[in-house]
Amino acid sequence: MDLSSDVWNQVALEASQLYFTEDGKSPFANTSIEKLPDKVILHIFSYLSHLEICRMAMICRRWRTIAYNTQLWKNVSLRPEVSGLHVGSLESLLSLISVRFGPSLRYIELPIELITHTVLHELSSKCPNLTHMLLDFSTAMQLHDFSEMQAFPAKLRYMCICLSEVIFMEGFMRKIYNFINGLEVLHLIGTYEKCEEEEEEIYEVINVHKLKSATPNLRVINLYGINFIDDSHIDAFSSNCIQLECLAVNFCNKVTGSTLKALLARSKQLKCLLMNGTSLKSEYVMQAEWDKCSVQELDISGTDLSTECLIDVLTRIPTLRFLSAGQINGFNDSVLKAWMEGGNPKTLIALDLDSSDNISDEGLARFITRYGAQLQACVLSGMTHITDQLWMTIMPILTNIRIIVMGTTERLSGNIHVDQLMDTIGSHCTKLERLELRWDPENLRFSDKSQKAIDLLRVKCLKLRCLVLNDGRYYETVKANFERADRTTVVRTTTSCRVSAYHVLSNYNDLIFN
């Protein structure tokens, strides 16, 4: 036994002192961690990360046996930068697959050094219930030899491939085409965040036109930050994937929208279309038959669409429940007015207008006064003219709100009276789950009695899972308040966490990737 076991025994001792029967004896008297049944310890271990489970396995032989129970190894990441787990050799991994993973394994993440035909054969043979897989080729300078690969997990429903900038994947992909026709969710993750300002030669490292033929059952396609993806690739998927519900091409800057008309005409079940940071052209977007489509969730943030185009689209979409249209110069009061008069915002539950500087606070107030009661997510951040005064006005209307993002990192000329703001949120937004205040700490003004407002927020908003603030005095005050109430994971800083309206997307769980 070591320190970890001593801690468990101390917990058991303290628990035994809390409850007493009429004769003065506790039913937990003389209880220690060693006396707990295996199934109880197994349940406790299920709340730990795999790295922590491995540490528990070093305590004693009994704990080692429990730690290696396959029920604890259903979802496994072997990428050290994600999970902290590092497998030193292929032989060790093959042993783990056979002994520790087995039929219980549902999800696995593999780094480039562990993606070999031997490992994939073993997963196919020993893990018949494997349905979710992530293959990380992002750091690859060369691939292993897959010429002898004859087997691959055949029950996959979700596959995520992190692409390399320079390694061509077709040799590997040819080997797996016959095994992935059951895929429903596909993520291809590019190197958008690694790109330098000076563009180098762009390689099409995976053949999308062949891939689409092998995956006719896709419901969700996420092409994220891939520098070679263009409109022809969207056209290819739409021509073969008749069950397509969600298409995301965020930060694929070669996408212009020239095949949008064909996409909407073919994909009758397409409800979610995410095109943040693309190069959409207004004339192409206006050619699409939005009035006949099934799209309910639309992200066009960070594009250069004109005011005319925005009015045309928003007044033609029959039922829009999610709109993200931030960072667009053409989005102004006239767009909101036309949408209210000629469109159908009555179904809207999420609105993200981050950094839309050409919208006035009066225009926003009119829109939210009319439709705020139905909103579940409201993102009005990145605008210096949207201060606590507007939020104080609209907060009583946002009775169904779950997600709020407010404030800007730019230094303001005035101050934000955060005590009054917190008090109003706590009083009216009791369904709130996620809240972010991006204001500079220097602009936040709070009194010595601010604890009362924080208490109200904490007590009234019991569903609050994430409260994000800029690091500073107020952050420390709020964090300490929540920690005293044993809600230690709620308060976070903007350096490590951001709140998004994406949580209310109908396919949100399918769109998550690591």
Image (tube, rainbow, N blue to C red):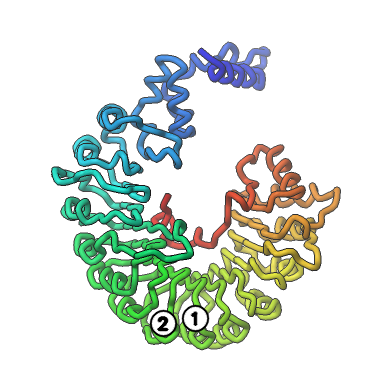
Residue 142 in the image: state x and y as whole percent: 28, 47
**Label 1: few (<14), some (14–19) or many (≥20) C-alpha neighbours in 10 Å:** many
Rendered image quadrant of residue 341: bottom right
Residue 184 vertical placement versus 397 (above, below): above
Instruction: Give the residue number, with chain letter if any, for mark 1.
Output: 305
Q: Nearer the viewer, residue 120 or 74?
A: 120
- Per the model, the C-alpha gap separating discs 1 and 2 is 9 Å
- Residue to which mark 2 is pinned: 285
User: Is disc 1 in contact with disc 2, using a CB cutoff of under 8 Å?
Assistant: yes
**Which residue is nearer to you in this view: 462 or 148?**
148
Q: Residue at x 31, y 63 (%)?
A: 203
Q: Is residue 230 left or right of residue 152?
A: right
Q: Amino acid at mark 2?
A: Val
Bin the neighbour count of mark 2 within 10 Å (Cα to Cα): few under 14, some 14-19, many 20 and up. Answer: many
Instruction: Decide if residue 480 is on the left or right side of residue 50.
Output: right
As drawn, the residue found furthest toward the right would be: 448
What residue is drawn where x is 54% and y is 20%? 4
Residue 395's place in the image compared with 452, above or below, is: below
